[in-house]
């Protein structure tokens, strides 16, 4: 059974870079049928897609975050990572990593499974 | 890109059916059959309950069903149960090769 686990600092200072890693277990990140993505949820608010990556490195980002986001993949470690620069309090959220189904090239379909999520607070 | 539009809340009594709508545009919901629905209980990660408009992942109750007409997708829950009380989110693939979520709907089982 595929599982995803987020890891990284729970507290980041304003203007610094948020860095998280997602470790995939029970399956290979090099699957041709899937993308790997990051989604966040501010406390008490809805879900926001951040971006996704294919095992070969191709990425897709939310237009609203594109200038600050970098998602990378390390197939040797079965991990993918998120970096979000110049963070502010508005970036405080639970960050989820997850797997997208890929019905065809450049199509991001449904998301399953999700990691348990990790709360990242931006505060000095 | 703006979030897909969902009602903020819906409610129903046990045994009843409810429907949650999700309205987008021809660039997302109306343009592709890649609409999915997620159930989220408090403090938990979301779980997919409908994918590709009307398909249920393995293990999801057949009380959950999905449909789409034009730019609006819908999730129907029949035979409402107390355990269905949760937040529900729709999502769609977009013509910009991105993913967009709805604002979420809180379902209350009376």
Image (cartoon, rainbow, N blue to C red):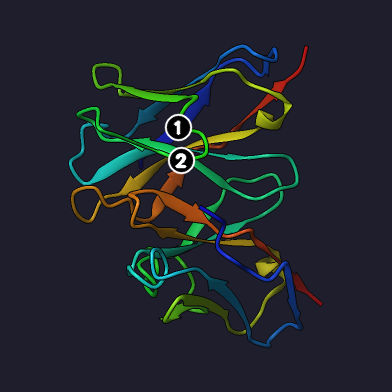
Q: Within the image, what quadrant is residue B19 found in?
A: bottom right
Q: Which mark is residue A66?
A: 1
Q: In the displayed structure, does residue B58 sit left or right of residue A55? A: right
Residue for point 58% across, 45% down: B45
Residue A114 is situated, as x and y percent measured from the top left of the image, at 47, 43
Both marks 1 and 2 on one chain: yes
Residue B102 is situated, as x and y percent measured from the top left of the image, at 57, 60
Q: Residues within 10 Å of mark 1 (few under 14, many from 20)?
A: few
Q: Which mark is residue A63?
A: 2
Chain for disc number 1: A
Residue for point 50% across, 37% down: A115
Location of the N terminus of chain A by quadrant is: top left
Residue A56 is situated, as x and y percent measured from the top left of the image, at 19, 29
Whether pointer 1 and pointer 2 mark residues with C-beta atoms closer than 8 Å, the reply is yes
Disc 1, SS:
loop
Residue B109 is situated, as x and y percent measured from the top left of the image, at 76, 74
Q: Within the image, what quadrant is residue B55 found in?
A: bottom left
How far, Cα to Cα, is label 1 from label 2?
5 Å
User: Is B62 situated above or below A61?
Assistant: below
Chain for disc number 2: A
Q: Looking at this view, name the residue that lies furthest to the bottom.
A: B16
Disc 2, SS:
loop
Along the line of sight, the residue nearer the viewer: A65 or B36? A65
Q: Within the image, what quadrant is residue A22 found in?
A: top left
Q: Residues within 10 Å of mark 2 (few under 14, many from 20)?
A: few
Q: In the displayed structure, does residue A10 sit left or right of residue B75? A: right
Counting every numbered tag in the picture gives: 2
Residue for point 78% across, 11% down: A124
């Amino acid at each position: 059974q595929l599982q995803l686990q987020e890891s990284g600092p729970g507290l980041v200072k304003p203007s610094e870079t948020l860095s998280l890693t997602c470790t995939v277990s029970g399956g290979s990140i090099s699957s041709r049928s899937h993308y790997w993505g990051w989604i966040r949820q501010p406390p008490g608010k809805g879900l926001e897609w951040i971006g996704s990556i294919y095992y070969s490195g191709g990425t897709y980002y939310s237009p609203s975050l594109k200038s600050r986001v970098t998602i990378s993949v390390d197939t040797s470690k079965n991990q993918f990572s998120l970096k979000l620069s110049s963070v502010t309090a508005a970036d405080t959220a639970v960050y989820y990593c997850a797997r997208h189904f890929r019905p065809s090239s450049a199509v991001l379909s449904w998301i399953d499974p999700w990691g348990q999520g990790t709360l990242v607070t931006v505060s000095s | 890109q703006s979030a897909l539009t969902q009602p903020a809340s819906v409610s129903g009594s046990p045994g009843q059916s409810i429907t949650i709508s999700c309205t987008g545009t021809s660039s997302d919901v109306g343009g592709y059959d890649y609409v999915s629905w997620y159930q989220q209980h408090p403090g938990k990660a979301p779980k997919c309950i409908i994918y590709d408009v009307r398909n249920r992942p393995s293990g999801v109750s057949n009380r959950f069903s999905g449909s789409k007409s034009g730019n609006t997708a819908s999730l129907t829950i029949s035979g409402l149960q107390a355990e269905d009380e949760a937040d529900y989110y729709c999502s769609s693939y977009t013509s910009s090769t991105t993913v967009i979520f709805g604002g979420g709907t809180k379902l209350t089982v009376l």
